Amino acid sequence: MNKENPLAEKSYNFALKIIDLYKILTNQNKEYFLSKQLLRSGTSIGANIAEANGAISKADFSAKISVAYKESLETKYWLSLLKDSEYISIEYYDLLFSNADELSKIMFSILKATRIKNSEN
């Protein structure tokens, strides 16, 4: 993993936590629908950040970060459903939700900064 890009590293580590939760939900709880949605959105954050890092233009970069940001919002939604339906503990939820929220805030700051720069040009 790229140690020089904190966002990429954080999103990769978050994806690993999501994969671990998916394994628990499917193997122990036999929950397949919500966990699959969580797996898709939670791992998509890092994938879109990786694509953004390889962007060929500022607009391409901004678009990929925007998708990653939206995936982080979706991930928080699935985590909330899993908590409220009692598939995951409040402690597990708090940990993962705070990680997803941190990623969301970083990406939102990046989006604000890139859009301000793009509007100045």
Image (tube, rainbow, N blue to C red):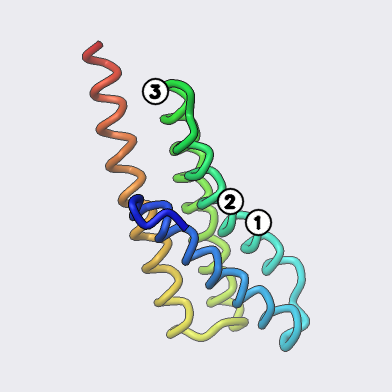
Q: Earlier in the sequence, mark 3 or mark 2?
A: 2
Q: CA distance from mark 3 to mark 2?
A: 20 Å
Q: CA distance from mark 1 to mark 3?
A: 26 Å
**Residue at the spot 54% in from the left edge and 53% down from the top edge:** 74
Question: What's the residue type where badge 1 is placed?
Answer: Arg
Give residue 88's position: percent from left, percent from top.
56, 82
Give the quadrant of the C terminus: top left
Q: Give the number of the disc on residue 58.
A: 3
Front of the two marks 3 and 2: 3
Q: Who is closer to the viewer here, 57 or 89?
A: 57
Q: Is residue 25 above or below residue 98?
A: below
Q: CA distance from mark 1 to mark 2?
A: 6 Å
Identify the residue position indicated by label 1 in the image: 40
Question: What's the residue type where badge 3 is placed?
Answer: Lys
For the residues bearing labels 1 and 2, Cβ distance under 8 angstroms:
yes
Give residue 79's position: percent from left, percent from top.
53, 68
Q: Is residue 20 above or below residue 49?
A: below
Q: Earlier in the sequence, mark 1 or mark 3?
A: 1
Q: Who is closer to the viewer here, 50 or 23?
A: 50
**Residue at the spot 21% in from the left edge and 14% down from the top edge:** 120
Seen as rendered, the residue at the extreme top is 121
Q: Is residue 3 above or below residue 116?
A: below
User: What secondary structure is found at the residue carrying circle 2?
Assistant: helix
Identify the residue position indicated by label 2 in the image: 44
